[in-house]
Structures are given as structure tokens and as C-alpha cells.
Amino acid sequence: MDTGICQACGTAGGALMKFSLGKDFFGRPYDRLSPSSDQSPKWYCAACSMHKNLQRDFRDIRAEYDKLSAGQGSELAKGDEFLRASVRLREIMTILGAAQEPSTLLAEKDVKLLIERLNTATMPV
């Protein structure tokens, strides 16, 4: 943990966290701090850390949707992952809608658009 300024919302003086190692929404490992990935990690307050996780899940789902739409191999071609992603997007929308301040990391309109696209896509079996 660090103390300083949140690099998303600008809040100062509170405890800050950074994300470096973990798994993406589909369970694939990632490392933001490897030299080829991220030379300057960012620090976030607790609320922005949560929104950063939401943003990461949204981006993972959108990337897989783009692959699916292009006819490429996609995690969303698996019916259970497609359903899981749809549920996660609705959760993200609910969390963003309940926040006191709009997220500086993720726009509700982008999440809503992806939900609409998934709703019109044919769910794999």
C-alpha cells in the first residue's frame, strides 16, 4: 500500500493499492508489472480499485465479444462463459448505477451497449 494521490479520481491522503498480478475474467493470468507490460504502475483508492476491477472484466468480455463477432475463437463461444459474462455485465451496470460519483474508469453507456450487443447475439450451446 502507498499513500498519495489516486491516479483515477485524484483523492489524496488515503491508502492506495495497485494491481499487478492476477487473473482476468476468464481465468487467464496477467502481469501488469512485467517490463513489457507496465513500466509505471498506477495507484488507486479503494473505490477506484473496485472500478479498475470492473473495467478489467468489461475489457476482457468486450475483447472476447469482438473475437466472437469476427468469427474467431472466443471464450464466449462456450455457453457457460457467455452466460457468466452476461451476468457479470449486469452486475457491473448495477454497481456503476449505485455509485455516488460516476466512474472515471468505466462509462455506464459502454457497459449498456455491450449488454445490448450480447443480448442480440446468439448464445452458444
Image (tube, rainbow, N blue to C red):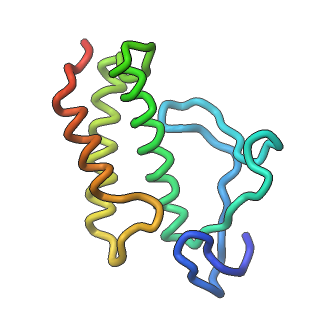
Measured as percent of width and height from the top left, residue 61 is found at 41, 36
Q: Kindly identify the residue that appears in the image at 65 percent across and 72 percent down.
A: 16
- Specify whether 13 is left or right of 123: right
Task: Name the residue at the right extreme.
Answer: 35
Please say if 123 is above or below 97.
above
Residue in the image at 51% along x and 67% along y: 48
- What residue is at 58 percent from the left and 73 percent from the top? 45
Q: Quadrant of residue 63?
A: top left
Specify whether 87 is left or right of 13: left
Can you name the residue that lies furthest to the bottom here? 13
Q: Is residue 14 above or below residue 42?
A: below
Nearest the viewer among 69 and 115 is 69
Q: Position of residue 83 (x, y in %)?
A: 28, 29
The C terminus appears in which quarter of the rendering?
top left
- The vertical placement of 105 against 8, above or below, is above
Residue placed most toward the observer, 123 or 39: 39
Most extreme residue toward the front is 70
Give the total of numbered labels.
0
Residue 49: image location, x then y, percent: 54, 63
Lateral position of residue 82 relative to residue 4, left or right:
left
Residue 122 figure quarter = top left
Q: Residue at x 36, y 71 (%)?
A: 102
Which quarter of the rendered picture does the N terminus lie within?
bottom right
Relative to 68, say whether 120 is above or below. below
